[in-house]
Image (cartoon, rainbow, N blue to C red):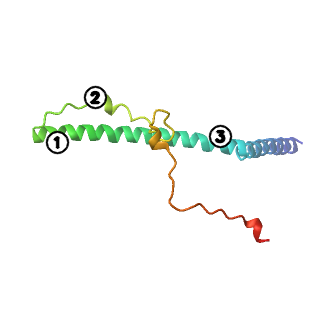
């Protein structure tokens, strides 16, 4: 009697454990969860790339100082440059302060030919 009760309880516990495990895995494989995981990985990768770029920049400043010292050049090194990356660049076409001559449309010496595919039928 105790043997059957033990195996029944063990089977029920294994069933609950397996069901919980499968449901957890199914929730991880939903599109929303996969998108969130991908976004988290992208953010993490971005942070790692930024840290790498800052390390490279610090190494460049240090090496430049070493070379300047070895060559006898007394150029001041910007201390804030090794802690910050340059800001994003803007295209001239998107810049409202850009002169009109830079954003003007190019004109070509030949006429523009339009082709309507519906005329063939």
Does the rendering let one see residue 93?
yes
Quadrant of the snapshot with the C terminus: bottom right
For marks 2 and 3, the one nearer the N-term is 3
Quadrant of the snapshot with the N terminus: top right
Q: Position of residue 111 (x, y in %)?
A: 57, 61
53, 9: nearer the viewer: 53
Q: Which numbered mark, 2 or 3, is in the foreground of this view?
A: 2
**Mark 1, residue position:** 67
Q: CA distance from mark 2 to mark 3?
A: 38 Å
| Crowd rating for badge 3 (residues with CA inside 10 Å; few <14, some 14–19, many 20+) | few
Residue drawn 22% across the image and 40% down it: 64
Numbered disc total: 3
- Tell me, for residue 36, which label it has, or none: 3
- Tell me, for residue 79, which label it has, or none: 2
Q: Position of residue 119 (x, y in %)?
A: 76, 67
Residue drawn 18% across the image and 39% down it: 66
């Amino acid at each position: 009697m105790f043997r059957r009760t033990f195996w029944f309880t063990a089977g029920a516990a294994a069933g609950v454990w397996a069901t919980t495990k499968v449901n957890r895995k199914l929730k991880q494989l939903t599109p929303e969860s996969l998108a969130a995981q991908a976004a988290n990985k992208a953010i993490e990768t971005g942070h790692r790339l930024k840290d790498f770029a800052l390390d490279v920049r610090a190494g460049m400043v240090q090496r430049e100082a070493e070379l300047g010292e070895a060559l006898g050049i007394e150029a001041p090194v910007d201390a804030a440059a090794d802690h910050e990356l340059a800001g994003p660049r803007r295209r001239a076409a998107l810049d409202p302060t850009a002169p009109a001559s830079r954003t003007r449309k190019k004109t070509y010496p030949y006429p523009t030919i339009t082709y309507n595919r519906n005329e063939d039928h």
